[in-house]
Amino acid sequence: MPKNFNLGNIKLDLPRVVVLVLLGLNLVAGWFVFSPLGGSAQDMEAQLSALRGQAKERKVSLDRTKKLTTNMDRGRKEGDDFVATYFLSRPTTYSTVVDEVTSMAKRAGVRVKEHGFVEDPVEGSDELSMLSINGNYEGTYADLLHFLREVDKAPRLVIIEALSASPQQGTGVLNINMRANTFIREAPLMVVAENGGVAR
């Protein structure tokens, strides 16, 4: 004879309660079989495929960023090398300019008369200035062409801004006026040596 439980006015039949509990548990288990927590095998395969796609996209993006960083580092080094090679450092600016321009003129057979200098800051830079050189010379047309070739091969960056030549009456000699620009770096460049040290 089944036992009955009396909870106030409610009578519970134990076997029925057990059957109902087991039925409820079977329904829950059936739900998880047809609809697992992580999704079906197809859902999980789709998620895995999407994750692989994202990983591939991120690897491509990372490789692109590494390449860009490498190019930026190379560009910075080449820029620093260019400035160190072609721009004058502040302590030796005027003597170097005068020596180099005078040497170029002598090699070309041009006679140097006088030089004037004007220095202006380069807009947007605290470390660079532009030095304008205004020079007067005398020489033949062939000497002038030779002088221009020498300026073109100068060890520093020299930009000819203006050039005028007027003949001296009956001599075959030209009065030459040239305005050229070169650049000065205010502070010594910091160059990282291969061993990790810093060179100037």
Image: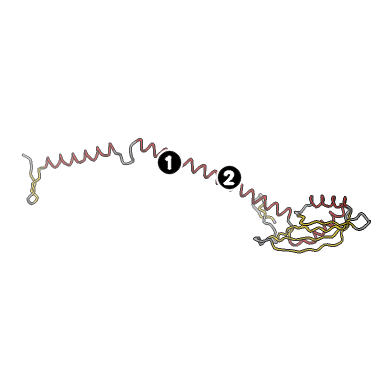
Q: Is residue 39 left or right of residue 130?
A: left
Q: Which residue in the protein does label 1 denote? A: 51
* Colour scheme of the picture: secondary structure
Helix, strand or loop at mark 1: helix
Work out which residue is located at the far front of the displayed protein and give it. Answer: 169
In the rendered image, residue 91, in percent from the top left (x then y), is placed at 75, 62
In depth, the one of 26 and 69 nearer the eye is 69
Q: Residues within 10 Å of mark 2 (few under 14, many from 20)?
A: few
Q: Amino acid at mark 1?
A: Leu
Q: Quadrant of residue 159?
A: bottom right
Mark 2 or 1 closer to N-term?
A: 1
Work out which residue is located at the far left of the displayed protein and give it. Answer: 1
Helix, strand or loop at mark 2: helix
Q: Amino acid at mark 2?
A: Lys
> Taking 109 as reference, is 28 above or below it?
above
In the rendered image, residue 175, in percent from the top left (x then y), is placed at 87, 58
For the point 76% across and 64% down, which residue is it? 118
For the point 41% across and 38% down, which residue is it? 48
Q: Badges 2 and 1: C-beta atoms under 8 Å apart?
A: no
In the rendered image, residue 152, in percent from the top left (x then y), is placed at 79, 50
In depth, the one of 23 and 82 nearer the eye is 82
Q: Quadrant of residue 30?
A: top left
Q: Which residue in the protein does label 2 denote? A: 67
For the point 23% across and 40% down, which residue is it? 28
Cα distance in 3D space between marks 2 and 1? 24 Å
In depth, the one of 175 and 46 nearer the eye is 175
